[in-house]
Image (tube, grey):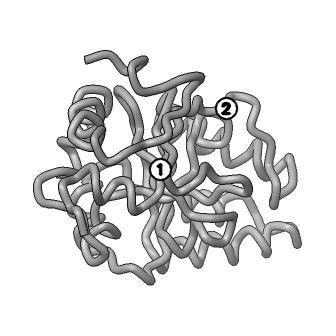
Amino acid sequence: MKLKQYLIDGVDDVDLEKMTDWQKIINKDCKQYVKEVGLFDTPIDRNNIFTKVLFRGFQTPPPDWRIEKNQVRKDRRPRYIPERLHKHLGDLTKEMFGWNTRTEGLFTGSFSIAGSFGQPRVVIPIGKYRYIYLGDDELETLYIMYDLWLQQTPYDELEEIVKKYNPSGLRPFLRSRKGNDRWECIVNCKEYYVMSMDIIKQISGNSK
């Protein structure tokens, strides 16, 4: 089964007859993620979706019935923090984790975090990927540090927070999450699928 049967210019308007085929496609294209988080171990519903998927906020999201295949931008520029802080965080994560999260990362997280940046959509990394994530308390501390840094917070204090990012154990971390939690997961991948919560539920075998 070839993806081009369903995607035209990276877009697929989904109908119910394709849901089984799409699960096969995602199992193949997103094998690492599907296995790591147990994406299709059980049908996805409104209760467990927050423990299985990553969300990203979009200013112009795809329609609810559409699946898109996007590439991770390599020319990402900061929207909410100064360029010098953007560069420093990139250098820190490059040194600590082996890749620059600010220029090589896809920023995802909880539904509530995604909603702070746009309309939340489910994102699924394609192919091999790496990640780091930060839980509720540490994330709030990091946001506070951003504000303090604008008032000349020393670099070493920010470094201590960045060290709290975790580069492994995504499945148990997600399994412990709730719908109103606030957390961040930065993913290093080349491409990813974007879809609505209703679509991923139906792809997983949940027809309700």
- Image x and y of residue 21, in percent: 24, 33
- Please state which of residues 154 and 17 is positioned toward the viewer in this rendering: 17
Are there few (<14), some (14-19), or many (20+) residues within 10 Å of tag 1? Answer: many
- Image x and y of residue 195, in percent: 47, 50
Q: Which mark is residue 169?
A: none
The residue that label 1 is drawn on is 195
Q: Amino acid at mark 2?
A: Arg
Are there few (<14), some (14-19), or many (20+) residues within 10 Å of tag 2? Answer: few
Mark 1 near mark 2, Cβ–Cβ under 8 Å?
no
- Please state which of residues 16 and 183 is positioned toward the viewer in this rendering: 16
Q: Residue at 79% x, 49% y: name it.
A: 78
- Tell me if I can see residue 185 in this picture: no
Of label 1 and label 2, which has the lower sequence position? 2
In-image side of 74 versus 109 (left or right): right
The residue that label 2 is drawn on is 73
When asked about the image quadrant of residue 75, the answer is: top right
Q: Is residue 195 above or below residue 154?
A: above
Q: Residue at 47% x, 68% y: name it.
A: 110
Circle 2 SS class: loop
When asked about the image quadrant of residue 87, the answer is: top right
In-image side of 184 versus 150 (left or right): left
The single residue placed furthest to the bottom in the displayed view is 180
Q: Amino acid at mark 1?
A: Met
Q: Tell us which disc is closer to us: 1 or 2.
A: 1
- Image x and y of residue 123, in percent: 46, 48
Q: Is residue 175 above or below residue 133?
A: below
- Please state which of residues 142 and 9 is positioned toward the viewer in this rendering: 9
In-image side of 23 versus 7 (left or right): left
Q: Is residue 84 above or below residue 162?
A: above
Q: Residue at 35% x, 57% y: name it.
A: 53
- Please state which of residues 8 and 189 is positioned toward the viewer in this rendering: 8
